[in-house]
Every structure is written in C-alpha cells, then in structure tokens.
C-alpha cells in the first residue's frame, strides 16, 4: 500500500516521505480500515520530531485521526466489515492514517453518523471530543459565560470556538496574525486579539470590564497559560489542553487562591469508551441540529501531506487540515 513513512527524527519535511509499506493486519479488538480521509494535527509533527510521549519506534506511519471503511477485523472486534467509522488510529504502533490502510482499536472508533462525509468525520474525533471534555465535563462552561480560546486558528482552537458558541458562551479568540484572527472571527469568535502585537491580558480585561474570562481553553501552554491567570474571572477555570509553544505552563498557586480559580488538566485519552460514547452522541446531536459543523478548512491530496505537516510545524496552517484519499 502507499503510505507516508517517518524514517528518522527531525523536521517533518526532512524525515517523512511517501513510499510502499505492507498492509497491516488487525489484532484482537482491532479493525483494518481503508482510509477515506485523515486529519492532521500538531501531535503528528511532534512525533516526527521525536517529542511526543506515545511515539512508535522508527520507521512508522503517523496519522492519529481517520475516517474510513472497515475492510477486515481481528478477533472480538465490535465492528463489522463494510461499516463506516471515524476515530483514532493505532498510531502508537506505527499504523497511522497517512496511508491507504490503517489499524484502529475498536474502543477508539465511532460509527460515522448518517449524512457526515469522510472529510468532516476525519477531523472530528480529537478536536471536538477534546473541546467537549474540556468545556463541558472538566470546565463546566455555562451559557452566558466568557470563554477565552488561545491558538484559536488551530485545529483544537477552532473546535473550541465552535462548541463554545454552540453552548451559548461569549468567545474571545487569540492568535498571532491578522489572517488567523479573520479566520477565528469567521468561526464565530465575538472578540479577537492579536497577541503578537497586543497584550492579551490587558485586552481580555478591557473586553470584560475587568472581570476576566470564566473559562480559558489553552492548547498553547508556556507563558500563554501562565499569563492567562492574570485575566481569569473569580471562580474561573484554566484548562490545560496542549503545549504547542513547546512547554507546558505552570499555574501560580497564589493567583489561583486569590481568584478562587482552578487549573484543570484535560486528557480525552484517560476517559473510558463508555463515557466518551455519551460525549460523542451529544456532539453528533449538535451537528444534526445544525449547531456545529466540523467542516475542515483545508482538504489536501495524498502528495501534499509533507508540505502541510511543515505548515503546521511553522504555525502557517489555518483550522483543521484533512488529507482525502
Ligand atoms: N489534551 C488533549 O486531549 C489534546 C487533544 C488534542 C490536542 N492536544 C494538544 O493541543 C496542542 C495543539 O494541537 P493542534 O492540533 O490544535 O495544533 P494546531 O492546529 O497546530 O494549533 C496550535 C496553535 O498553537 C499556536 N502556537 C503557539 N506557539 C506555537 C509553536 N511554537 N508551534 C506551533 N503552534 C504554536 C498556533 O497559533 P498562533 O500562531 O496563533 O499562536 C497554532 O495555531 C498540541 O500540544 C496537542 O498535543 C491535546
């Protein structure tokens, strides 16, 4: 089968190349999928760089997110050949979705809802499940509250804007350029701050008349995370989603106490499949009601993958990018 194969550790375009690889065989509880579309995310870049905790040994095929058709199953797999499914691959075994076929464990898969195309389904599971667990389960975002989304033009950030608006929040988006902010505004953000040329803390405090944001959704980490405590409301929740900046932030205990604020970790992988079924069903309902549309911003062909991973690495991608096969 054709596949993008990572054969060394380094910058994506230097270490990943298209090639031929044997079609993998599903083990117990696993399905072999014919890939319809694959979602790109920063973790794929981090795996190329050898900076992701669940990186498989070299050489490997990356690609965490997939939508496709079940073409073979291992023992006790709960899906049947012919079913259309979406979810997270066995990338940690090197059988990711940047290929014609990939492996996925059944506990990471969900049936593709009627009417959802592969491109939408491929970029759905990780960003929207994370947004749901972050905003609803962990962050308890209420209608009318103020949600601050960092990295708002990235894949995780855009999903948080969509869900935040669907839940009735006022959304403040931050990003590093004018085109990213135009994109965040088009996704529904009510206020946009360019943190490359304005202090986002001062801007959030001004927008909220000094009250601050009730919930902060932070896939960026580092100083962005730490400084967010300077513009969080009393009783606010600071959600640690990711570390796109290269390091996790550290929440200052004194400020947390002064504001009765909470620093909360968000990791979808630690939620059980049964719990996630409920989250998934609620998200699918929002899509069916037309309150959420997971359309990716960019759909690329197989040959363009290396270039787009490099764009993600260089902060040059907008929203979700999906590779269609
Ligand atoms: N907790 C979970 O369950 C979970 C789930 C999904 C993803 N994540 C994590 O969330 C993070 C973001 O993932 P993603 O797929 O949303 O990434 P993405 O689409 O690339 O978006 C990340 C955003 O972070 C900002 N950023 C700041 N410094 C950066 C840097 N040095 N390099 C790249 N981007 C930088 C960029 O926006 P600006 O240019 O506007 O600053 C970029 O748009 C990753 O750390 C990922 O592992 C966690």
Image: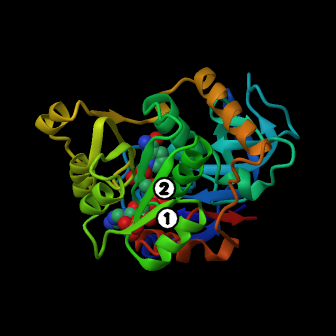
Q: Position of residue 244 (x, y in %)?
A: 36, 58
Residue drawn at x 62%, y 45% as measured from the top left: 166
Q: Quadrant of ligand 1?
A: bottom left
Q: Position of residue 30 (x, y in %)?
A: 68, 33
The residue that disc 1 covers is: 153
Q: Quadrant of residue 296?
A: bottom right
Q: Residue at x 56, y 52 (%)?
A: 159
Q: Quadrant of the C terminus?
A: bottom right
Viewer-proximal residue, 72 or 220? 220
**Which residue has dot 2 on it?**
157
Residue 90 seen anywhere in this rendered image of the structure: no
Q: Quadrant of the N terminus?
A: bottom right
Query: Disc 1, ligand 1: is the CB inside 8 Å?
Result: yes
Q: Give left or right: position of 172 versus 70.
A: left
Measured Cα–Cα span from mark 2 to mark 1: 6 Å
SS assignment at label 2: helix
- At mark 1, the secondary structure is loop
In percent of width and height, residue 48 lies at 43, 62
Q: Residue at x 28, y 72 (%)?
A: 198
């Amino acid at each position: 089968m054709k596949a993008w194969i990572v054969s060394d550790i380094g910058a994506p375009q230097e270490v990943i190349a298209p090639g031929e690889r044997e079609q993998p065989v599903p083990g117990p509880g696993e399905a072999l999928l014919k890939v319809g579309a694959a979602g790109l995310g920063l973790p794929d870049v981090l795996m190329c760089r050898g900076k992701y905790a669940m990186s498989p040994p070299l050489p490997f095929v990356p690609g965490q997110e997939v939508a496709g058709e079940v073409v073979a199953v291992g023992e006790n797999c709960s899906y049947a050949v012919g079913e259309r499914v979406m979810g997270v691959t066995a990338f940690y075994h090197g059988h990711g979705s940047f290929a014609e076929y990939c492996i996925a464990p059944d506990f990471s898969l969900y049936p593709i809802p009627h009417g959802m195309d592969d491109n939408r389904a491929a970029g759905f599971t990780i960003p929207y499940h994370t947004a749901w667990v972050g905003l609803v389960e962990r962050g308890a975002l209420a209608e009318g509250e103020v949600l601050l989304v960092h990295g708002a033009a990235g894949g995780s950030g855009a999903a948080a804007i969509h869900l935040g608006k669907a839940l009735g929040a006022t959304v403040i988006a931050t990003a590093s350029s004018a085109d990213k902010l135009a994109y965040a505004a088009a996704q529904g953000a009510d206020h946009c701050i360019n943190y490359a040329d304005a202090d986002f803390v001062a801007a959030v405090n001004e927008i909220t008349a000094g009250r601050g944001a009730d919930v902060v959704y932070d896939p960026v980490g580092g100083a962005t995370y730490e400084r967010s405590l300077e513009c969080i409301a009393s009783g606010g929740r600071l959600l640690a989603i990711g570390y796109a900046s290269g390091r996790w932030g550290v929440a200052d205990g004194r400020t947390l106490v002064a504001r009765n604020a909470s620093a909360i970790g968000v990791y979808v992988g630690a939620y059980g499949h049964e719990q996630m079924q409920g989250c998934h069903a609620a998200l699918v309902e929002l899509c069916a009601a037309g309150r959420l549309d997971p359309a990716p911003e960019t759909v690329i062909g197989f040959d363009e993958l290396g270039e787009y991973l490099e764009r993600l690495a260089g902060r040059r991608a907008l929203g979700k990018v999906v590779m269609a096969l």
